[in-house]
Amino acid sequence: MGLKKKEKGLAKSRAFFDKRRYKKSMTKFMSLFKQKERVEMGLQILLYTAFYTICFSILEKGAHIHYHTIEIWPDSHIPFLPIFIVPYFMWFGYIFAAVFWLLFYTKSTRECQICISSLVIGMTVFLLISAVYPNKLVLRPHIFGTDIFSKMVVFLYETDTPTNVFPSIHVFNTAVVCSSVIKSAQKKRAKALNLLLSAAIVLSTVFLKQHSILDVAAGLLMAAGLRRGMEKVFGREEEKEEGIFSPDGSFGILEMRQK
């Protein structure tokens, strides 16, 4: 009798945990629909990235174009530091990871909207500037070093032309994403690391002679202007929401009240 009761108890426990597991799975599944706005934003940025890449490739292949040289006198006094190729290449992973985190792990849907809208508008403005005002740099040095960093810079120079550089998309995207991460991150350490990496990426553009100070200044100003504009467009909100994926691995449920 005692054994049968024990078996029944185990069966009930399994059924209870199976129900909890099923309920948790359904909650995850349904919450995707409740936060479909974020999923849509993710798809939109992917589609726009494809569009941007195609347009930029066409602009880069323009033949017999008169390019305007972008340069200011301090550019020639900035040292060439190959080691900054590391944060320069880290930009690609940083932008992807930060945007993914903003879309699916953070509380503010408004902050996602500000970030994505700023990126799309700014990158479109860059394409238009490149089309009507083709520009180039003449700052790149001859590289004689044989160390790993110098070789990485040589690879960069061979794959990335010094044309259509104003404003710097490296700087613009970094500034936009950095501001959104700082607004959304809860831990001071995460904010500090984000700021340090962003600063290193911005500095890398001039230390590698990939951009002029003018490109950097224009990228920062465009990021700040669009951020301010998008904040007004999307208004304020009282946030009571979670990202699709909460820290414990479960799916969050969106609850947001617009003011």
Image (cartoon, grey):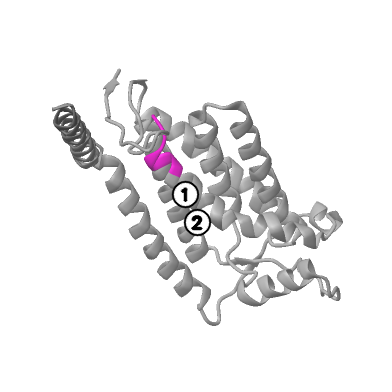
Measuring from the top left, give residue 153's x and y in whole percent: 73, 69
At label 2, which amino acid type do we have?
Phe
The residue that label 1 is drawn on is 122
> The N terminus appears in which quarter of the rendering?
top left
Q: Which residues make up the magenta segment? A: 101-107
Instruction: Give the structural element (helix, strand or loop) at label 1.
Output: helix
Q: Looking at the image, which residue sits at the far bottom? A: 63
Residues at marks 1 and 2 touching, judged by CB atoms closer than 8 Å: yes
- Taking the spot 63% from the left edge, 60% from the top edge, the residue there is 89
Q: Nearer the viewer, residue 191 or 137?
A: 191
Q: Nearer the viewer, residue 189 or 235?
A: 189
Number of other residues with Cα within 10 Å of mark 2, as a class: few under 14, some 14 to 19, many 20 or more:
many
Q: Nearer the viewer, residue 56 or 188?
A: 188
Residue 146 found in image quarter: bottom right
Q: Nearer the viewer, residue 30 or 140?
A: 30
The residue that label 2 is drawn on is 126
Measuring from the top left, give residue 88's x and y in whole percent: 66, 57
